[in-house]
Image: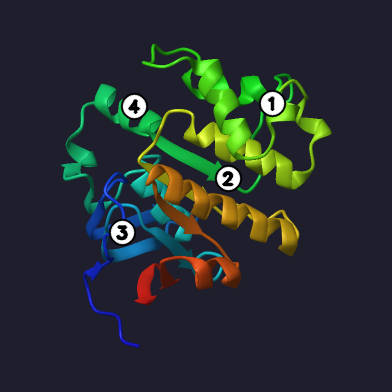
Amino acid sequence: MPFRSPLRLDQTAPTGARVALSSVTRCFQTGDGQTLVAVDAVDLEIEQGTVVALTGMSGSGKSTLLHLIGALDKPTSGHVEVDGKDLDTLSRRRLADYRRSVGFVFQRFNLLPALTVLDNVVAPVLPYRVPYDKHARARELLTQVGLANRASDAPHRLSGGQQQRVAIARALINQPRLLLADEPTGNLDSRTGTEILALLMGMRDRHGVTIIIATHDQGIAERADHHITLIDGHLASI
């Protein structure tokens, strides 16, 4: 199926973030002075409350695209807009606020080994004043991911799938409207990966979060609302 640009994804929920990329390109300089184009002139619109799977071979630009949307990196050219705001125009303070408003889930969980499960979930908001009880919300999220009885455990006592559940709860502690997941099932067996995907889909249904998942897992691609393939930094197909 030929790709038509820009891609517009249907709205399915009113509360998630809307993401729009316009001619977004990200280049890197290699050690030998060559230019590597990781993301190449991407036009993309993602409506609120959708689950989108980004697939492609390693090096196709999936993670770079997530980093650009999450403001962990800046495009060489083009514009990334979230809810109509161009990230490139935000002040340093507002950009930091935006990063804190996005939920991130990574392949390696990135839990802090010295903290309990509960404290890992609370950690992203611990230094900040928020309009809710941090620990009460963390316990609520642990209940939602099926780990209410493991709140006082250290992360190393949990299985890989359980640790990823904690990471998802942590990503939701700040009530994000956008959740970015980079290979969230990459270190898990197929059964556990299926459970994690079901959990993510349930979080979308419960909280209305827009979710973008970079993955090699075709099972995720098949169950996502929309499936986008990247080849050499280009959006190739849906």
Q: Earlier in the sequence, mark 3 or mark 2?
A: 3
Query: Local crowd at mark 2 within 10 Å, few (<14), some, or many (≥20)?
Result: some
Dot placed on the residue nearer the N-terminal end, 1 or 3: 3
Q: Would you name the residue on which mark 1 appears? A: 117
In the image shown, does 121 or 13 lie closer to the viewer?
Answer: 13
Q: CA distance from mark 4 to mark 1?
A: 25 Å
Looking at marks 4 and 3 on the same chain, the residue that comes earlier in the sequence is marked by 3
Instruction: Name the front one of labels 1 and 2.
Output: 1
Could you say whether the residue bearing mark 4 is in a helix, strand or loop?
helix
At x 39% / y 29%, what residue is drawn?
Answer: 100
Q: Nearer the viewer, residue 106 or 132?
A: 132
What's the amino acid at mark 2?
Phe
Q: Quadrant of the C terminus?
A: bottom left
Which mark is drawn over residue 12?
3
- Would you say residue 60 is visible in this rendering? no
Disc 4 target residue: 96
- The correct choice, above or below, for 209 with respect to 191 in the image is above
First reached walking from the N terminus: tag 1 or tag 2: 2
Residue beneath label 2, please? 106
Residue under the point 31% across and 86% down: 2
Answer above or below: position of 61 versus 156.
below
The amino acid type, in three-letter code, at marker 3 is Thr
The disc, 4 or 1, on the residue closer to the chain's N-terminal end is 4
- Check disc 1 and give the amino acid type: Val
- Mark 4 vs mark 1: in front: 1
Q: Residues within 10 Å of mark 4 (few under 14, many from 20)?
A: few
Please tell me in which quadrant of the rendered image residue 229 appears.
bottom left
Residue 93 location, quadrant = top left
Element type where label 3 sits in the image: loop
Q: Residue furthest right?
A: 157
**Between marks 1 and 3, how big is the CA–CA gap?**
33 Å
Query: Disc 3 vs disc 2: Cβ atoms closer than 8 Å?
Result: no
